[in-house]
Image: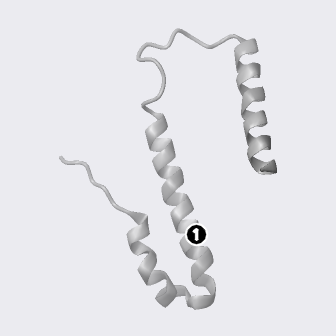
């Protein structure tokens, strides 16, 4: 059986007719965000080593979390 692909964004043109113009902008934004989130989650499955070596040390996790917060804070203050 082949891979089934479906774009949520292709459904955006019908939203104004279903919800009205006033609510369409928020609905399309939600639809696009959902599609992007699903694509991100689906692509994450391929990250990482083929044979994981086990759980990383706590110091490595803490360092990664700190780096992530620094990145987010730098992006939000720009």
Which residue appears at 73% of the width and 37% of the height? 71
Left or right relative to 17: residue 10: left
Residue marked by disc 1: 29
Q: Is residue 55 placed above or below 73 in the rendered structure?
A: above
Left or right relative to 3: residue 78: right
The location of residue 39, given as percent across then percent down, is 46, 49
Which residue appears at 76% of the width and 13% of the height? 59
Q: How is the image coloured?
A: one colour
Left or right relative to 27: residue 65: right
Q: Residue furthest left?
A: 1
Q: Is residue 19 placed above or below 70 in the rendered structure?
A: below
Which residue appears at 43% of the width and 13% of the height? 51
Q: Secondary structure at mark 1?
A: helix
Q: Is residue 24 placed above or below 45 in the rendered structure?
A: below
Q: How many marks?
A: 1
Residue 23 in which image quadrant: bottom right
The location of residue 47, given as percent across then percent down, is 47, 28
The location of residue 28, given as percent across then percent down, is 54, 73
Which residue appears at 49% of the width and 14% of the height? 52
Q: Residues within 10 Å of mark 1 (few under 14, many from 20)?
A: few
Residue 12 in which image quadrant: bottom left
The location of residue 9, given as percent across then percent down, is 43, 68
């Amino acid at each position: 059986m082949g891979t089934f692909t479906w774009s949520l964004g292709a459904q955006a043109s019908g939203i104004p007719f279903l919800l009205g113009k006033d609510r369409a902008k928020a609905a399309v934004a939600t639809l696009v965000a959902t599609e992007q989130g699903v694509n991100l989650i689906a692509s994450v499955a391929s990250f990482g080593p083929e044979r994981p070596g086990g759980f990383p040390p706590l110091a490595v996790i803490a360092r990664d979390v700190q780096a992530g917060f620094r990145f987010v804070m730098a992006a939000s203050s720009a």
